[in-house]
Amino acid sequence: MCTEGFRDENSTANWTRTAGFSSQSSFQIVQVFLGAVSVLALLGNGLVCVAVLQNRQILRSAYNRFLFNLAMTDFLTGKGIEK
C-alpha cells in the first residue's frame, strides 16, 4: 500500500495547528507545570524532613526511616527539576 501523499486529518500535528497552539506556548505551559511540581515537592518533603529532624525518636522504626529517606529523595528530585 502506497502511503505517499497520505494525510491524516486527525493527527496531533494538525489538531495543534488548527487549535492555534504553538510549540512555544506548549513549552511554557510545561515549564509552569514543572515549576509548580518542583515547588510543591520542595515544600512538602522539606516539611517532612524538618519534622523528623526535630523529633529524632521518630527514626527508631524502620518504616519511619524509609519514609524519611523517601522524603529526602523526593526533595532532591524536586531540586533537580528546578534547574
Image (tube, rainbow, N blue to C red):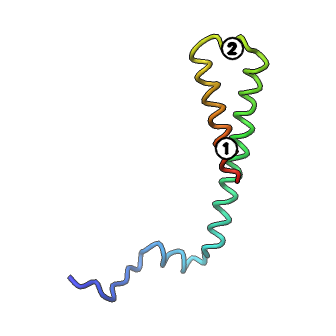
User: Looking at the image, is 58 positioned above or below residue 46?
Assistant: above
Left or right? Give the position of 64 relative to 12: right
User: Looking at the image, is 51 positioned above or below residue 44?
Assistant: above
Tag shown at residue 9: none
| Residue 78: x %, y % from top left | 67, 44
Name the residue nearer the viewer: 64 or 32.
64
Q: Are marks 1 and 2 in contact (CB under 8 Å)?
A: no
C-alpha span from label 1 to label 2: 24 Å
User: Residue at point 63% right, 66% down?
Assistant: 27
Which residue has dot 1 on it? Answer: 78
Q: Which comes before the other along the chain, label 1 or label 2?
A: 2
Query: Which of the image's four quarters has the N terminus?
Result: bottom left
| Residue 40 placement: quadrant | top right
Pick out the residue farthest to the right. 54
User: Looking at the image, is 50 positioned above or below residue 25?
Assistant: above
Which residue has dot 2 on it? Answer: 58
Assess disc 1: are there few (<14), some (14-19) or many (≥20) residues with their C-alpha within 10 Å of its C-alpha.
many
Name the residue nearer the viewer: 38 or 73.
73
Q: How many marks?
A: 2
Assess disc 2: are there few (<14), some (14-19) or many (≥20) residues with their C-alpha within 10 Å of its C-alpha.
some
| Residue 24: x %, y % from top left | 65, 73
The secondary element bearing badge 1 is classed as: helix
User: Looking at the image, is 43 positioned above or below residue 60?
Assistant: below
| Residue 22: x %, y % from top left | 61, 76
| Residue 74: x %, y % from top left | 63, 37
Q: Amino acid at mark 1?
A: Gly
The secondary element bearing badge 2 is classed as: helix
Pick out the residue farthest to the bottom. 5
Q: Amino acid at mark 2?
A: Ile
